Amino acid sequence: MSVQSTTRRKTAPDIRARKGGEPIVMLTSYHAHTAAMVDRHCDVILVGDSLGNVMHGFETTVPVTLDMMILQGSAVMRGSRQALVAVDMPFGSYEAGKEQAFHSAARIMKETQCGAVKLEGGVRMAETVRFLTERGIPVMGHIGLTPQSINTLGSFKAQGREADSWAPIENDARAIAEAGAFSMVIEAVAEPLARKITQDVAIPTISIGASAACDGQVLVLEDMLGLSPKVPKFVRRYGNLGPAIEEAVAAYAADVRSRAFPAAEHVYDMKTKT
């Protein structure tokens, strides 16, 4: 007789219902073991296409593929139990049209068993968001600075610093909310604009460099742990694991060079588990 877990995983409607309530806690993860560590503390775990930068050393997220997202999304689902897992749709997997977006999103959800997908873009993606949500795929939007568009944006600069530049970003937010997204990430947007958007839309807004005016925050896990060599100015480092890892590796290397290997009787026996 199988024993089933009583832990209930959060869903997109659960996150949608948090609008104006307790702030939403969200972090990225790309591995089963880090997902297990953050799961109990997070409402949402994002399998971000930032894995291209963090895991593969790419300069941008553009080279990330759908297969890469599915592989890491599956790992995060295996490691987590209660958080909603949302998986980024990578560049080139949804922009050609709503049918392409549906096939890509359906693959992600079927093969990872995650609870939602995330895609970038505002007004231009509203029809796609509506198409997906009407067909049973929960969508998290992403407006403001959209990293997949870096080759047209030119740089990772903050958006909406001047009031006369607000209208397009506000239009993007309204379009995504009205199309049926259950929440949206607002990236690198000035606080007054982020506050106005948060007040104007009916779905939760999640900040990444858009201030505490939003309904929650997401950070790249490696950034806040001190594992990334370069981080945005808005990131608060809650740990400094990089130097600690280097120190441990240096100690290990010194042991190896001095032949301080474990004695045979202390070597783990993989066959007998003794």
Image (cartoon, rainbow, N blue to C red):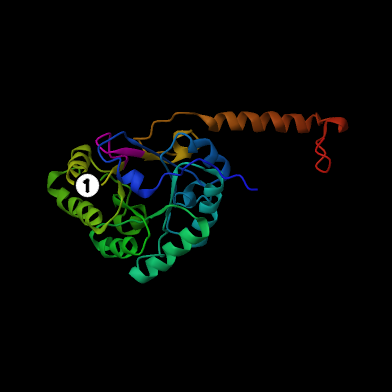
Q: Is residue 189 magenta?
A: no
Residue 194's quadrant in the figure?
A: top left
Label 1 CA crowd tier, 10 Å (few <14, some 14–19, many 20+) = some
Q: Foreground: 114 or 239?
A: 114
For image coordinates 39% across by 66% down, the residue present is 102
* Residue tagged 1: 202
Q: Position of residue 173 (x, y in %)?
A: 22, 51
Residue lying furthest front in this view?
Answer: 1
Amino acid at pointer 1: Ala
Question: Above or below — where is 58 with respect to 256?
Answer: below
Q: Position of residue 133 (x, y in %)?
A: 32, 60
In this rendering, the answer to whether 217 lies above or below 70 is above
Q: Residue 256 lies in what quarter of the image? A: top right
**Which region is colored magenta?**
207-217
Identified at 71% across, 33% down, the residue is 253
> In the depicted view, which residue is nearer to us: 255 or 141?
141
Q: Nearer the viewer, residue 125 or 51?
A: 125
Q: Residue furthest left?
A: 164
**Is there any visible trace of residue 65 in the rendered image?**
no
* 15 left or right, relative to 271: left
Query: Quadrant location of the C terminus?
Result: top right
How far across and down, in percent of the image, does residue 242 sit?
A: 54, 33
Instruction: State yes or no: residue 211 in magenta.
Output: yes
The image quadrant of residue 136 is: bottom left
Dot 1: what SS?
A: loop
Q: Position of residue 54 (x, y in %)?
A: 49, 46
The number of callouts visible is: 1
